[in-house]
Image (cartoon, grey):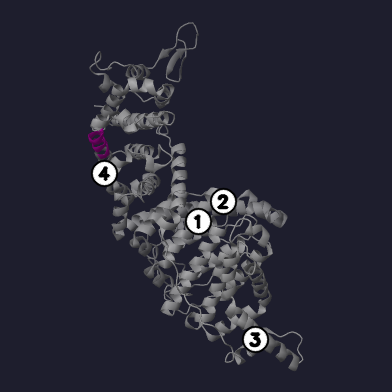
Amino acid sequence: MAQVEKRGGLLRKSSASKKPLKEKVVLMYDEIFMTEDPSKCSPRFWEELFLMKVNLEYLEGKLESLDGEELMKIKDNINCLFQHCIQALGEEHPIRVVNALQTLCALIRGVHQKNKSTSGFDIINMLMGFDKAELCMKNLMESLDSLLCAEGSESLKSLCLKLLLCLVTVTDNISQNTILEYVMINSIFEAILQILSHPPSRREHGYDAVVLLALLVNYRKYESVNPYIVKLSIVDDEATLNVSIWILFFLFRQYKDKEEEHQSGFFSALTNMVGSMFIADAHEKISVQTNEAILLALYEAVHLNRNFITVLAQPGVAPVVPATQEAEAGEWREPGSSVELPLDADVQTSNLLITFLKYSSIVMQDTKDEHRLHSGKLCLIILTCIAEDQYANAFLHDDNMNFRVNLHRMPMRHRKKAADKNLPCRPLVCAVLDLMVEFIVTHMMKEFPMDLYIRCIQVVHKLLCYQKKCRVRLHYTWRELWSALINLLKFLMSNETVLLAKHNIFTLALMIVNLFNMFITYGDTFLPTPSSYDELYYEIIRMHQSFDNLYSMVLRLSTNAGQWKEAASKVTHALVNIRAIINHFNPKIESYAAVNHISQLSEEQVLEVVRANYDTLTLKLQDGLDQYERYSEQHKEAAFFKELVRSISTNVRRNLAFHTLSQEVLLKEFSTIS
């Protein structure tokens, strides 16, 4: 018997003497693409169609091959197919339901693809007909909701989510997708939360469910009332915990997998052998794949609902810490099985915010391409929302809640990697500040990420404002921050010409100078000890040349009638107290050295001079140092989020695969059709 081959919906014998035979389902598709109603001659046509294995490739290809006019001629049959698909979703036979879901996916994608090149072509009318659209979509959304909430097949739930993702992402700009109006009216928010609340479903479908929610929240969010935004903003603690745990578990698993790969991989061994010449390659090895969709979901949760920030800061939750035996086997405990850990300074504790900080410490390292830049920006925006929240700050600064946070540090030739076991137990805000300092010192590069630097400095400023307001005396190595800020100023000055061609560097310089002004003016209210305040003055005096050079630069530009006159002038005025400190103490230090015949004073000798001459120092009171503009997405970030959602939508559509659910798997799961 001749071997039968199957290609493109055709069945053909290996001998080329006879015409190839078409699959029955392909013949039935061909009948739908005729102008006549296919059920006229075959009353059981629609019943039989959904027992046939769907040929997605052929159906989409057929739709693509027709022009707009040809498609309009068979509009009634397309409408009929769409309606029968929806009816089949209520069938008892799972195979019918699966085939109907896959057919809907092909229809929606195929018709939308055709719409790209056809003017005056209405998607809703072509798929359902204007007169029946409201009822069709109501029935479709109710059926999908029932399937997602049912205790039945995980394969069906997977296809339902893929259909919904298909529906949402067929247009690059989801806000131009008019079908989503019906998804707003017939909400599936509760079904998505139920999936995330149930560990087995969360394991299987968590990613698709979270991405779907993030996209739906962004539909016309600035133009009308979006019910998904409203519902997400009022969900309770238990639901927020389920969503947060899943998102952060997913991110941490990516981080942990890459970390282990880095530690045991080929590049690690190679780097150890040949030294620092391969340091850049080692850095690339630890970079996790960016996941903007998941970060967007976390952002929306944190931004819209204060409960999410509460959950992030909840002490003792460790959903991502492997049990000892599981860790040895390389397996991770499911997020739903989180445990309470003792808050003992000698015991490694964890919470969801630590997970996020660890992930951010890797994501924010690499800003070379657009996707990584977006991910780094999202991490900083999330930290901005956290830094503005009163509850989060109270937890971050609680001296009774101490954690060891092992942030990833970028490999650099001039510093050694800190040993993990030497990490101190500190309030969590120290880890946030460490992360900001790490970013500051590792991104002084030709492709200068100005926007990220501004956000980084803003996070530090907001934390300082809280400390000043609540008189929190944080035991932190402030010198590391001061040193990083001064080095950043030096970088701006040494690359003035190149940077000014692209950025207003005076905005960033002003923010840095005002951070120092915060310490000078209010440091006595939040620095841990009087000696910390002395060290601040010592650092300013020690690095006086950098501040002198900055003053010379901004004075030069503020006295010229150029583009930067006003911006540079603001920095000039902001430097008044720093210059007063330098001009007051430097002569006294030089005099002390001359009187005591010392060529180079020690730090302690300089501090002695500083302490002895505070009383005669005169500083000007500067207003507004402890004030900041609160984060506002709509007024400041709308363009960024529109572009981000467009990128995510395109990426989801590109990677969406309905045929990955093989017929063999389905037949095994639905072994009988009664």
Q: Nearer the viewer, residue 124 or 31?
A: 124
The crowding category of the residue bearing disc 3, from other C-alpha atoms within 10 Å (few below 14, some 14 to 19, many at least 20), is many
User: What amino acid is at disc 2?
Assistant: Glu
CA neighbours of label 1 inside 10 A, class few (<14), some (14 to 19), many (20+)? many
Q: Which residue is mark 2?
A: 261
Mark 2 vs mark 1: in front: 1
Cα gap from disc 1 to disc 4, whole angstroms = 32 Å
- Which callout, 4 or 2, points at the residue further toward the start of the chain? 4
Q: Is residue 71 magenta?
A: no
Mark 1 and mark 4 lie on one chain; the one further toward the N terminus is 4
Density class for disc 2 (Cα within 10 Å; few <14, some 14-19, many ≥20) is some
Residue hosting label 4: 185
Q: What residue sits right under mark 1 in the picture? A: 377
| Amino acid type shown at disc 3 | Phe
CA separation in Å, label 3 and label 1 = 40 Å
Marked residue nearer the N-terminal end (3 or 1): 1
Location of residue 439 in the rendering, given as x and y in whole percent from the top left corner: 57, 62
The Cα–Cα distance between marks 3 and 2, rounded to whole angstroms, is: 53 Å
Report the span colored magenta.
133-141
Q: Quadrant of residue 596?
A: bottom right
